Image (cartoon, coloured by chain):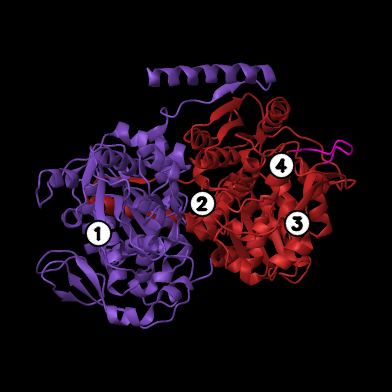
Chain colours: A red, B purple
Amino acid sequence: MTQATVTKARTFTHLVSKEGGVKYPLEALNVCEETFSPLEVAYDYDAIRAQVSRETIEAGPNSIWRYKAFLPVESENPIDVGTGMTPLVKSNRLARRLGLKNLYIKNDAVNMPTLSFKDRVVSVALTRAKELGFSTVSCASTGNLANSTAAIAARAGLDCCVFIPSDLEAGKVLGTLIYNPTLMAVKGNYDQVNRLCSEVANTYGWGFVNINLRAYYSEGSKTLGYEVAEQLGWKLPDHVVAPLASGSLFTKIYKGFREFAKVGLVDDKNVRFSGAQAEGCSPISQAFKEGRDFISPVKPNTIAKSIAIGNPADGVYALDVARKTQGNIEDVTDAEIIEGMKLLAETEGIFTETAGGTTIAVLKKLVEAGKINPDETTVVYITGNGLKTQEAVQGYVGEPLLIDPKLDSFERALERSRTLERLEWQQTIV
Amino acid sequence: MTQATVTKARTFTHLVSKEGGVKYPLEALNVCEETFSPLEVAYDYDAIRAQVSRETIEAGPNSIWRYKAFLPVESENPIDVGTGMTPLVKSNRLARRLGLKNLYIKNDAVNMPTLSFKDRVVSVALTRAKELGFSTVSCASTGNLANSTAAIAARAGLDCCVFIPSDLEAGKVLGTLIYNPTLMAVKGNYDQVNRLCSEVANTYGWGFVNINLRAYYSEGSKTLGYEVAEQLGWKLPDHVVAPLASGSLFTKIYKGFREFAKVGLVDDKNVRFSGAQAEGCSPISQAFKEGRDFISPVKPNTIAKSIAIGNPADGVYALDVARKTQGNIEDVTDAEIIEGMKLLAETEGIFTETAGGTTIAVLKKLVEAGKINPDETTVVYITGNGLKTQEAVQGYVGEPLLIDPKLDSFERALERSRTLERLEWQQTIV
């Protein structure tokens, strides 16, 4: 992938605390010292409006960098590894199965280079890390972020130290080690890993993409909003369903839609935001259902490890987005998650990880509860690839039919399988 | 992904035998009954020249279907799952390690939807299968083809029966089962699976993508040539290095370059074609080195299962291409294959499967032997994703450092790893 070259004046102006609006310079800062609320990047939207149009964006690189004016990087040559512009799939077969009419899958299971939406935030964070002079980058990760940070750091020639919970799926561990970073497997859950990393960030001069670089990093998720709007023909959808881990992705897709409306790239409208969690780690869903405006941390226990964050940093902001857009937040069991993975694969040929299974299962649950109108243009965000969480479905997808390399052996096996199918089919209609 | 809509007159005219030029109608036919040589699709290149230009192609869909005029399908809406237009990565860090100046990686490890180049040939084959009226599609596969056929058949709503050797990597088996096809695991190697499938193809009215649909299917690989030429700014490279399994990919990239020159989309030139095999299955490499113009079949024994074809259907044609373009064919050991996978990951952040490791290891071997000129614009084809062959590198990529969620535990581990690195570094310079 040749690097994107977009020469424009800087459009981001400062950091500001999410509460109280305290201003900070554009450095590697985490939280507001006065309000203790997270910091966010502020932009000059007049400058953006003057720089971009649908035409300039369409003429840009086929990656997240076509939206560079909306992202907090100054480099004329940001790290471009082809991240973004993943397919928005019109999902007619899944839609029929669920009784929907206008369903789309935003498929980041094939995002580049490491097959999850994390490549978006890491491309932004590591570009900013280089601008701020960091030579070592790091992260606290449930797996996908570890893969992405290690891969893109390797490509960019940055030193890399990654922290993960020690019980991660084999594919996510190997999919990090292969890039040869320093990999720390912490005996504990993600929230303990995260606390340790905050200490390390304060002691070492490292750029932690989701701690001291988090304000820049999280902006990368806005591109999941921009791309959907552009791929729908410069229109906002009626309803989106996305997974909730820290809550950041959810709130940034919302921010992306708001920004596109603000600068006049799309007509403004209310997009309903519905969030998906696993029952075994559903602090945001619980707060939503109980009408609370605060999150009670939980101890995660689910196969959906990539979204198993018991103390979500942006949980309250995700709650707020769901409520003010008339969306919903639901959670599903591990069994429903596996069914969701299989349903998406069988109908659309997309093999997603447990987080995607969670989102599909919640979609199904919301449709059955009448909380998604069949006519709504609904976009479901699939954020990671099933090859990384093979343990989750191993044993739930049947077995191959073992045969000899002979025609009669094949024919006997085929007859057996067809008889089986007939029986299953008869059972379903009984 | 919205479907490609390119309305043009049909540009493919008939099937023709590779030897003797015997003509056949555009049906599901495998070999020439007179010469027993494979059948190939013939085109009306004047019609193509009249239809396409650099501009019309650039204005086409961001998938292989931008080259529809060069592909053997009639449908105005071919099956478009975003396949193709994968990144051509300028690989500066790997180039420096090898002493090259103009190295590019064509990265089909992130091809959509199933992360290998097979999505190209299957998109073409299943589109043609529907045109020819097949309701059940099938294939003989070493894994990647199984994944792709099952996934795209699911998306297209076609019945699917897939045949694989029973000893495949877990990721490739699960990555097929998830789409819920009928999966036959044959006790034998690929060549035995292939023979069985030829019998089944003659007995059942199924569309076998790589048997009775092979003439159409194999044309999909030409897009790996077209894309590289377009991504290089409508220029042909000086040298390509690609893996050799059946030999089809290799010869079709060559055909793609020839066709682009023939219709005037690029200036004509000799592109050197070098092929990569695993020592444990190197019938084409052996024939090349021994100056033979025939292939002696071998019994495969290598970790590079996806290219382990002991009796390659297009082996002699691949030999011919390598020789007439002043290329080379080399093979490497399983240990070199693993080193190749690690080298690509550490330098470019690309996690490829064993076939890609084979190609990188052969690239290294050819450079060290002076068979690739450092100034040549060299394109290496990476055809599959490492998450599917995790067994191959498991145990060769080190282990995570297991720590407690405490700063001092982290610091002790970091010190240990740094001491280790210093020792390794001292050993390398001793």
**Separation of disc 2 and disc 4 at Cα?**
29 Å
> Vertical placement of A422 versus A246: above or below?
below
Write down the region rendered in magenta: A29-37
> Vertical placement of B66 versus B288: above or below?
below
**Separation of disc 4 and disc 3 at Cα?**
16 Å
Coordinates of residue B394 in the picture (x, y in percent): 42, 31
The answer to whether the residues at label 2 and label 3 have Cβ atoms under 8 Å apart is no
The residue wearing badge 1 is B251
The residue wearing badge 2 is A351
Please indicate, yes or no, whether residue B313 appears anywhere in the rendered image.
Answer: no
**Residue type (three-letter) at the residue carrying disc 1:** Thr
The answer to whether the residues at label 1 and label 3 have Cβ atoms under 8 Å apart is no
**Residue type (three-letter) at the residue carrying disc 3:** Lys
Q: Are marks 4 and 1 on the same chain?
A: no
**Separation of disc 4 and disc 1 at Cα?**
48 Å
- Depth check, mark 2 against mark 1: the one in front is 1
**Separation of disc 1 and disc 3 at Cα?**
49 Å
Coordinates of residue A59 in the picture (x, y in percent): 57, 68
**Residue type (three-letter) at the residue carrying disc 2:** Phe
Q: Are marks 2 and 1 on the same chain?
A: no
**Residue type (three-letter) at the residue carrying disc 4:** Arg
The residue wearing badge 4 is A214
- Depth check, mark 2 against mark 3: the one in front is 3
